[in-house]
Amino acid sequence: MKESWKPGTVIYPLPAVLVSCGAGEEEYNLLTVAWTGTVCTNPPMCYISVRPERHSYEIIRRTGEFVINLTTEELARATDWCGVRSGRDYDKFREMGLTPVKGSVVSAPLVEESPVNIECRVKQILPLGSHDMFIAEVVAVQVDDRYINPETGRFSLEDAHPIVYSHGEYFSLGKVIGHFGWSVRKKKKRTAKK
């Protein structure tokens, strides 16, 4: 039997990401975002939704740039801390021992310790209610080469132990259960041994 709940945001789990912003070192900031995702492949576009009262909101709105930094088990404490502390009161990079690195295209810094940094340029801001959605074009992606298999060239994000957010809790991702298209892939016929 199903229980009926009031309408709400229960699409979980979601990636827990650190969003970095700021045009110069004096205003670099980090905020934790779970309302994020892909919206288009060509051109590559994604979004983040941010409450207007957040310190980073005005920085992103003014500069039109931000970086989505994927998080890992190793970054879990910093991910949570940056979500409950304000950049008005703290230098979050310094407090969490994170390293800001100049982006290759945007002015916003990358988080060196993140396995994937997605540099974004805002294309549109949609006021939605409690949050405004920043729809952005991906203008560059940086990946940590420690997770690239030198023989196959395959990027193995799973080796970085990424985390997700679900109903107020952080979880580490589990085991692989299949690959895209595996449910319809034809099985190879076995040949009889002679």
Image (cartoon, rainbow, N blue to C red):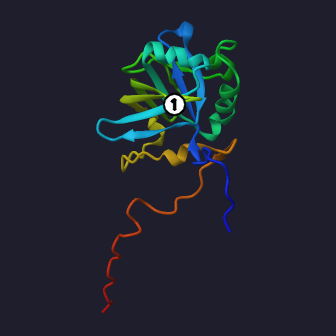
Residue 190: which quarter of the image? Answer: bottom left
Q: Secondary structure at mark 1?
A: loop
Work out whether residue 113 can be spotted: no
Residue at image position (42%, 40%) is 38
Kindly indicate the quadrant of the structure image that contains residue 54.
Answer: top right
**Front position in the image: 147 or 176:** 176
Quarter residue 50 falls in: top right
Query: Which residue is painted at 39% across and 48% down in the image?
Result: 154
**Picture coordinates of residue 126 (x, y %)?**
45, 27
Location of residue 193 in the rendering, given as x and y in whole percent from the top left corner: 33, 89
Residue at 39% across / 45% down in the picture?
150
Quadrant in the picture for the C terminus: bottom left
Closest to the observer, 47 or 192? 47
157, 63: nearer the viewer: 63
- Residue situated in front as seen by the camera: 98 or 6: 6
Which residue appears at 60% of the width and 44% of the height?
A: 9
Q: Return the x and y of residue 89 as percentages of the image width and height.
A: 70, 12
Q: In the image, 60: left or right of 12?
A: left
State the residue position of label 1. Answer: 128
Q: Amino acid at mark 1?
A: Leu
Q: Residue furthest top?
A: 26
Q: Is residue 54 left or right of residue 128?
A: right
